[in-house]
Image (cartoon, rainbow, N blue to C red):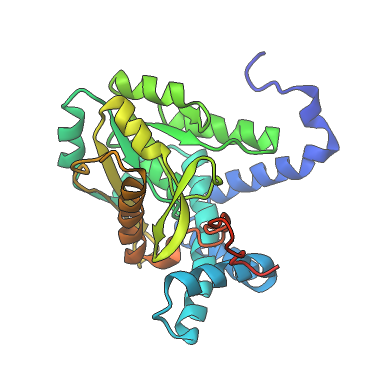
Amino acid sequence: MPKHVFPDSFVHPRYWPTWLAIGAMYLGAWLPWRLKMLVGRIIGLSAWRFARSRRRITETNLALCFPELSERQRAALVRETFIANGKGILETATGWCRDPKHLRHRVTFKGEDHMTQALAQGKGALIIGVHFSTLDLGGALHSLFFPADVVYRAHDNPLFERFMTRARRRIFGRAIDRHDLRDVVRRIKTGHAVWYSPDQDFGRDASVFAPFFGVQAATLKLTAKIARMTGAPVMPLIFHRNPDDATYSMEYLPALEGFPSGDDVADATRINRVIEDAIRRHPEQYLWLHRRFKTRPRGDASLYPK
């Protein structure tokens, strides 16, 4: 198929809202930075006010994970979470639609030596990412320092899936569907680094239950399995928006020692602890809007309101 020519189905009126969304993302990507953050704040506040089901999910997650906070503190954190994720929409647009080189001056990278040492072993690397609102911008900025592939979940909308996958393939070496374990292992064994974010609930069959902020959470076994199959160092990566709303911090922590251990629950608990420590730095920037505790141990009631 010639470049920039799409199937006739994408011209169907049902895809017009998607085309508008894609156009809006291109426009948002080119806004001046301060205006971009302002628009993101407005989007976040609008969602906080009107997306009531998502707000209830966020309130539930934060009540479970931060019981030490007062109701007023948690209410403020809920609001800041929506604002941060609103800004994340504009950051995602920037990461997908623009050359990341123009943002090099906005990022400070620490711990580069940890990744350099890991890759020098010749076994590739498994990067442990976290679902922060800055995730896709982080991937774009990471590409300025180290090449990597990314594991992703396919979007249900085929037009947006094409747009998203093309954008990620421009940033990363390869975008790998999360179901394609064989390709993940193959790429790592040939010396590539693969970015993988294991902090979402994909159901009982793929998971074990391990504590996440003290709550039993369905946690993927795949992290330990990939590490076991490849022998690759497992590299925690942390990425945050700084309080100035204009710069970012990225940091590699040392490779996890003695991982995997052979105990799925212990390994899942360790990965969750790494993710918790990253979240606690800037908890408002995490994707608390999704139902992290959707899958419950057998016999336990749902934690989310109907």
Q: Residue at x 21, y 42 (%)?
A: 255
- The answer to whether residue 288 is left or right of residue 106 is right
Classify residue 278 by image quadrant.
Answer: bottom left
- What is the residue that sits farthest to the right in this orientation? 13
Would you place residue 83 above or below residue 122 in this image? below
Residue 218 x %, y %? 48, 52
Residue 148 x %, y %? 35, 31
Q: Which quadrant, please, contains the N terminus? A: top right
Residue 180 x %, y %? 50, 26
Residue 4 x %, y %? 65, 22
Nearer to the camera, 207 or 94: 207
Q: Residue at x 75, y 22 (%)?
A: 7
How many numbered dots are placed on residues in this image? Answer: 0
- The answer to whether residue 248 is left or right of residue 79 is left
Nearer to the camera, 65 or 295: 295
Would you place residue 118 above or below residue 219 in this image? above
Would you place residue 111 above or below residue 173 in this image? below
